[in-house]
Image (cartoon, rainbow, N blue to C red):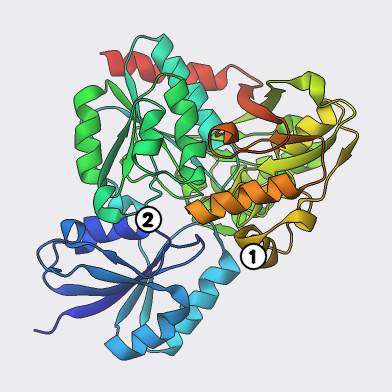
Amino acid sequence: MEKEKIIIIGAAGRDFHTFNVLFRGDAEKEVVAFTAAQIPYISDRIYPPELSGKFYPEGIKIYDEKELAHLIKKNKVEKSVLAYSDLPYQTVMEKASLVNSLGSDFELIAQEKTMIKSTKPVIGICGVRTGVGKSQTARYVSKLVKKSGLNAVIIRHPMPYGVLKEQIVQKFTKLSDLDKYNTTIEEREDYEPHIKNGFTLFAGVDYERILRMAEKEADLIIWDGGNNDAPFIKTDLLIVVADPLRAGNELTYYPGATVARMADMLLINKVNSAKPEDVERVNAALNSINGRADIVLCDSIISVDNPRIIKNSRALLVEDGPTITHGNMKFGAATIAAEQYGASSIVNAKKYAVGTIKDTFLKYPSLDAELPAMGYSVKQIKDLEATVNAADCDIVISATPTDLRRLINVDKPIVQVYYELSPKSAALDRKIEGFIKKAKK
């Protein structure tokens, strides 16, 4: 019997996990290719034999998604599986239309089918879009767990952008591990704050192996999600965060609305930066799709490590890359900090962009004043450094959660921005405390 030919359409993360859980051991199906998009430098690689298993002794080639149509025709592909996140519904259906027009089925796999069962209690933190405040929520929850005396271990949604056979399982306990694994700026943004807070964090590619290693150390596991994806691990409590600064997105992005429907508790973050009518709009939308979940309003509290030098300064603003690129956020925490602490003016970052950073501005026309902290390669980090040095400004206000001062050498002072979750009621704390009591039994 001839094997069913499959392509997995992805972006280095969900795609690999879907393969590992559903296709790696299936002798009746053949994944002929992965395609990659959204993140720079992740195509033209091999999913290696160390990960692909016995049916793929030479691994599986990863192609740029631009080659999808050619690959379907060449390989007579019967099914194309979408396995990446934070896509507008229009884009999802455009991909479906292309795939179907070539005679291939287009499949969206239910997230539940790829969730691995843990032997330990699991709290999941996810979002309806990238940049809603998942990681600050995970930090808030992890501190509550730590205060209770339980040992919480963080498992982070994957960002396997490097040499895949070296990223099968990654364990981070100290900042030097970020260098050990040659992490990108995006990875550092999500890993570094947890490490500084004293937590062990696992990430990588093979989440069955990752989970089993984490279980040996953990009393309780916290899933810190990526983009608007669902957890890879079956959760006992799922908290999903929404963002009124992009009101309406909670119902129009895949798979964010699916995750919101699955939630046990919904948080509306950044209330202190949003218009009241947008908060109400998000509240009504979430309630319309998930009336059983409690909805908690939260502020995102901004602080900086050197407020004195911001006042009356011309500031270059650096933001978390994914949030203001494919996340479509119009402004971030650096803008709020500049206003809050009295910067005299905002320097237009686009004017000074060089190399791959300039390419990023061309790819995302909505970018303007703020500089995305892109750093997916050594060259891109160097281009980021050159862009900052070229800018005619007095200071840099950096709201990427990683400390850029460890990565780039610049000729002007960098002020680091911090943002922490502040719930406007005790409902979140009560929910976590109740969960902890059950976990201790």
Q: Position of residue 186 (x, y in %)?
A: 51, 45
Question: Could you tell me if residue 57 is visible in this image?
Answer: yes
- Front residue (pair 197, 343): 343
Residue at 89% in and 39% down: 345
Residue at 39% in and 87% down: 70
Q: Secondary structure at mark 2?
A: helix
Residue at 74% in and 45% down: 331
Q: Is residue 303 above or below residue 56?
A: above
Count of labels in the image: 2
Q: Is residue 234 above or below residue 305?
A: below
Mark 2: amino acid: Arg
Residue neighbourhood size for the residue with mark 2, other residues' Cα within 10 Å, grouped as few (<14), some (14–19), many (≥20):
many
- Front residue (pair 324, 286): 324
Tag 1 residue? 359
Relative to 162, 363 lies left or right: right
Residue neighbourhood size for the residue with mark 1, other residues' Cα within 10 Å, grouped as few (<14), some (14–19), many (≥20):
few
Tag 2 residue? 14
Q: Is residue 310 above or below residue 10?
A: above
